[in-house]
């Protein structure tokens, strides 16, 4: 994974955790906190060099982010409110595109 793709992943991990913390503090949503921390932890494993083979780490992080994308899409469809799930859906999509374009 090149430097830019890895930086995008770390920024996304921070945003994902921040979103979970905001959801917990504003709406007392433990589900938001647990889900964001779980997905972020899995992504950290793919971002740290040496844990997985480079190509596998990239593919696994893409799968994890695709799952997160689906989760946010379902939440957006259910609530019909752009904030916060719509925003995180867009952020996830942008992160996925940037990482994969940079990884080419």
Image: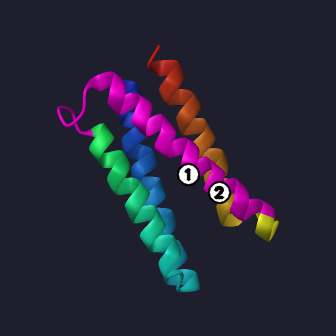
Q: Position of residue 36 (x, y in %)?
A: 46, 63
Q: Where is residue 80 shown, x and y percent of the image?
A: 82, 66
Q: Quadrant of residue 96?
A: top right
Around disc 2, counting alpha carbons within 10 Å, would you say few (fewer than 14), some (14 to 19), or many (20 or more)?
A: many
The rendered magenta stretch, by its main secondary structure, is classed as: helix
From the viewer's perspective, is residue 57 above or below residue 77?
above
Give the magenta part as a residue range.
48-77
Label 2 near label 1: C-beta < 8 Å?
yes
Q: Which residue is mark 2?
A: 72
Query: Taking the image as drawn, is residue 8 in sight?
Result: no
Left-right relation of 67 to 12: right
> Could you say whether the residue bearing mark 1 is in a helix, strand or loop?
helix
Magenta stretch encompasses residue 69: yes
**Inter-mark Cα distance, 1 to 2:** 6 Å
Q: Which residue in the structure is indicated by mark 1?
A: 68
Residue depicted at x 59% and y 46%: 91
When the figure is inspected, residue 100 is found, relative to residue 26, above or below; the finding is above
């Amino acid at each position: 994974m090149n430097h830019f793709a890895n930086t995008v992943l770390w920024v996304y991990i921070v945003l994902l955790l921040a979103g979970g913390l905001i959801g917990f503090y504003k709406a007392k949503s433990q589900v938001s906190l647990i889900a964001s921390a779980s997905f972020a932890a899995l992504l950290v494993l793919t971002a740290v060099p040496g844990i997985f083979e480079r190509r596998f780490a990239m593919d696994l992080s893409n799968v994890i982010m695709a799952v997160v994308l689906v989760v946010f899409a379902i939440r957006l469809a259910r609530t019909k409110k752009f904030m916060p799930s719509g925003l995180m859906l867009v952020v996830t999509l942008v992160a996925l595109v940037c990482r994969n374009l940079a990884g080419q």
